């Protein structure tokens, strides 16, 4: 991950819901209500023989940010570090073909934080339908063996867990090794295979 210069750790909302802070100090204050150019000024008050100068804030208001919109802006800013982290992780894993369904769940959670919504974080389970041509459950006994799914050979090269498998497949004229997670796709010779969850097992599903 890139080393960033912004404040680390969780960002929090203040009691008034328009100030963002970390555990140690304020980070930002979101505009709420009237906004414009304001500056200190002096006005003269009282009768001409007893005139007094009083200081006050003068200015030119340009607009108004409703309270509801200001609070939504604050929530979005509060979630910025989480969203950046989730996006960087997605980009990195997509670049190296490691992205799985759990990474999407993390991104959804960051979005929910920005919108102050609740999301249920869990690994997506796929329902098999007519689009599935064949499903092959992978177990630890398959390590070091070649399994065949819809006529395609897959060599189980390493560890098999409940949500990932080291799999070697033929693509673009050579064999490629991939540490695949549930929800990832493997494309070979114009066909697509998906790493899915079948009950409490990991499996390869062949789909066009």
Image (cartoon, helix red, strand yellow):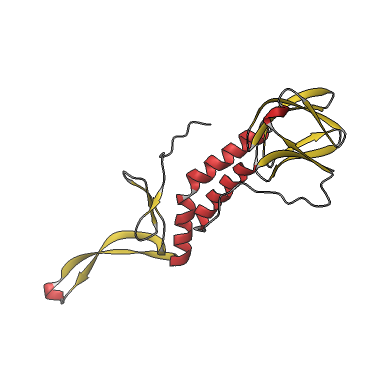
Query: Which residue is at 68% across, 46% downward?
Result: 199
Q: Determine if residue 179 is in view.
A: no
Residue at screen point 45% across, 61% down: 70
Q: Where does the image place residue 44, in percent across and percent down from the top left?
A: 21, 69
Residue drawn at x 77%, y 50% is: 128
Q: Residue furthest left?
A: 50
**Residue 91's image quarter?**
top right
Q: Residue at x 55, y 52 (%)?
A: 111
The answer to whether residue 96 is left or right of residue 193 is left
Q: Foreground: 91 or 204?
A: 204
- Tell me: 128 left or right of 9: right
Tell me: residue 45, above or below residue 206.
below
The x and y percentages for residue 55 are 22, 63
Q: Nearer the viewer, residue 175 or 10?
A: 175
Above or below, 19 against 3 in this view is below
Q: Is residue 18 above or below residue 101?
A: below
Q: Residue furthest bottom?
A: 47
Quadrant in the picture for the C terminus: top right
| Residue 181 at x, y percent in the picture | 66, 37
The location of residue 173, given as percent across then percent down, is: 85, 23
The answer to whether any part of residue 152 appears in the image is yes
Question: Which of the 4 image quarters holds residue 67?
Answer: bottom left
Q: Nearer the viewer, residue 177 or 201?
A: 201
Residue 206 or residue 94, whichever sits in front: 206
Q: How many marks?
A: 0
């Amino acid at each position: 991950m890139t080393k960033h210069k912004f404040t680390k750790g969780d960002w929090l909302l203040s009691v008034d819901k328009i100030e963002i802070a970390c555990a140690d100090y304020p980070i930002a204050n979101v505009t709420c209500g009237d906004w414009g150019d304001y500056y200190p000024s002096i006005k003269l008050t009282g009768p001409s023989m007893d005139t007094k100068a009083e200081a006050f804030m003068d200015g030119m208001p340009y607009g108004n940010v409703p309270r509801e919109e200001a609070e939504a802006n604050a929530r979005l800013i509060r979630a910025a570090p989480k969203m950046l982290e989730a996006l960087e992780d997605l980009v990195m894993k997509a670049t190296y073909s490691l992205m799985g369904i759990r990474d999407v769940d993390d991104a959804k959670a960051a979005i929910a934080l920005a919108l102050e919504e609740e999301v249920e974080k869990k690994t997506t389970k796929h329902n098999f339908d007519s689009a599935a041509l064949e499903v092959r459950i992978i177990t630890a006994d398959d390590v070091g063996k070649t399994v065949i799914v819809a006529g395609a050979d897959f060599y189980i090269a390493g560890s098999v867990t409940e949500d990932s498998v080291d799999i070697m497949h033929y693509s673009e004229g050579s064999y490629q090794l991939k540490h695949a997670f549930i929800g990832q796709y493997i494309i070979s010779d114009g066909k697509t295979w998906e790493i899915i969850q079948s009950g409490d097992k990991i499996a390869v599903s062949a789909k066009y």
